[in-house]
Image: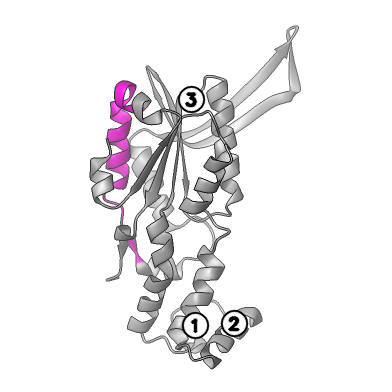
Amino acid sequence: MFDRLRAAGFQIEFASHAEAITSLDFPDVGRDLELALSDVRLPITEIVGGGGGETQLTQRLRRGFHDLGWRKRNIKIEKLVDGVIDEEATKSHEIDHFHATPKGSFALEIEWNNKDPFFDRDLENFKRLHAEGVISIGSIVTRGSELQSSLKDMIRLWAERENIQSFADLKNRGFKRPTERQEQIVEVLVTRGETFPAAWSHMFFNDKFGMATTHWSKLQERLRRGVGNPCPLILVGLPPTIVDMSC
């Protein structure tokens, strides 16, 4: 499974027998994942120009899964005690992409660039839903390790290509005014001999895509701690090949 994705550099990892379960009982799910992810492209301008809220990449991924029938689903689990619902024990779970089949259901979350505790939320939701028999497998799509390690250089190359030599140049391209802290970081690095593109890309990367955000190594930390266990999982890391440096 997922040979096409792996050939394109995607990281694929399975946990708790998810590979065997998927290959034997849900081969169409593997096909759907490849269809939704194989042709994803991310212009470098979206990386450097994205400002709060859901990124255009995430929106495109959501549309792809939505078109395949993986729709948002709110699941409410109630506890009944002697005919009376125990409101304190009632739990609601919102899944961004839920796919039901005759043999079982799948839950998928896209974590392109959130704060890394979102992984805990997703995995614990999967664990509870699996324990209740609601889902067979959970899946998370996030930035792969190679993409994470390449992003800063990609941002620098964009700044060099566009001849960004000051915050004024960035302002002219629609960037927000930097904070005093951001200006100080860049100023210190330039004083130490860094070019402005290198200094700015360092600051920009750390602020927007730093270690406390959702990416592959942070997801692996959770798995090593057993978060979400024993829910079967399919984990997908987006590769640097999705980034289009030409636009």
- Which of label 1 and label 3 is nearer to you? 1
Colouring style: one colour
Q: Three-letter amino acid code at disc 2?
A: Ile
Magenta-colored stretch includes residue 33:
yes
| Rendering coords of residue 21 (x, y %) | 37, 24
Marks 1 and 3, Cα distance to the nearest angstrom?
A: 46 Å
Q: How many marks?
A: 3
Which is more toward the observer, 205 or 217?
217
Query: Which residue appears at 53% of the width and 51% of the height?
Result: 218
SS of the residue under disc 3: loop
| Rendering coords of residue 171 (x, y %) | 49, 83
- Magenta residues span 22-43
Residue denoted by label 2:
185
- Depicted 196 relative to depicted 40: above or below: below
Q: Is residue 136 left or right of residue 76?
A: left
> Along the polypeptide, which appears first: circle 3 or circle 2?
3
Give the numbered dot on residue 199. Answer: 1
- Which of label 3 and label 2 is nearer to you? 2
| Rendering coords of residue 179 (x, y %) | 63, 79
Q: Which of the image's four quarters has the C terminus?
A: bottom left
**Mark 1, residues whose alpha carbon is within 10 Å: few (<14), some, or many (≥20)?**
many
Query: As drawn, which residue projects farthest toward the front?
Result: 224
Marks 2 and 1, Cα distance to the nearest angstrom?
A: 8 Å
Q: Is residue 227 left or right of residue 17?
A: right
Give the numbered dot on residue 135. Answer: 3
SS of the residue under disc 2: helix
Magenta stretch, main secondary structure, is: helix
**Mark 3, residues whose alpha carbon is within 10 Å: few (<14), some, or many (≥20)?**
many
